[in-house]
Amino acid sequence: MNDLYQRAKAALPLSQSQYSNFKVAAAIRLKDGNIITGVNIENASFGLSNCAERSALFSAYSQGYTKDDIVEMAITTEKDHLVSPCGACRQVMRELMPLDANVHLVTAKGDVTTVANEDLLPYGFDAKDL
């Protein structure tokens, strides 16, 4: 997991967080060994901004990967305390990642909390609810 965290940490400076000044980066490990990163991208119309977790997932899918290719995700910020994904990201992660995939929440100090994807959004909404 340390290499995954290091890739996320290295991506933090790429964050476009000029409004919130809250940099977030995510890194996804794929079964083929590749790691895909994403950062939060903000714009003046805040609702049109995109979080790091979704940026990484959308990048992976845009490259032809699917849910079955994803092993785990690491998420980090510049904060010394634990930061977890927002509700929108939890919903997208629930649908686009395996439910049993580990999600590592890593502080700037390197402290790690690991949870299963499905535990981030209990009773989540998905295609079977439509």
Image (cartoon, rainbow, N blue to C red):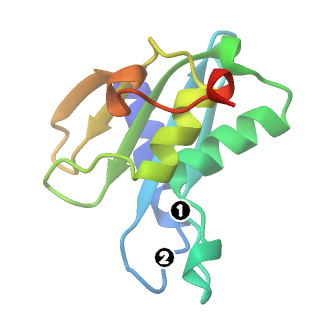
129 w.r.t. 83: above or below: above
Cα distance in 3D space between marks 2 and 1: 7 Å
72 w.r.t. 111: above or below: above
Q: Residue at x 13, y 53 (%)?
A: 81
Q: Residue at x 41, y 24 (%)?
A: 117
Label at residue 7: none
Look at the image and tell me in which quarter the N terminus lies: top left
**Secondary element type, mark 2:** loop
Residue 69 image offset from top left, x and y in percent: 68, 14
**Location of residue 29 by image quarter:** top right
Identify the residue position indicated by label 2 in the image.
Answer: 17
Residue 119 image offset from top left, x and y in percent: 32, 24
Q: Residue at x 84, y 34 (%)?
A: 63
Do we see residue 88 in this rendering?
Answer: yes
Label at residue 40: 1
**Secondary element type, mark 1:** loop
Disc 2: CA contacts within 10 A as few (<14), some (14-19) or many (>=20)? some
Q: Is residue 61 left or right of residue 47?
A: right
Look at the image and tell me in which quarter the C terminus lies: top right
Earlier sequence position, callout 2 versus callout 1: 2
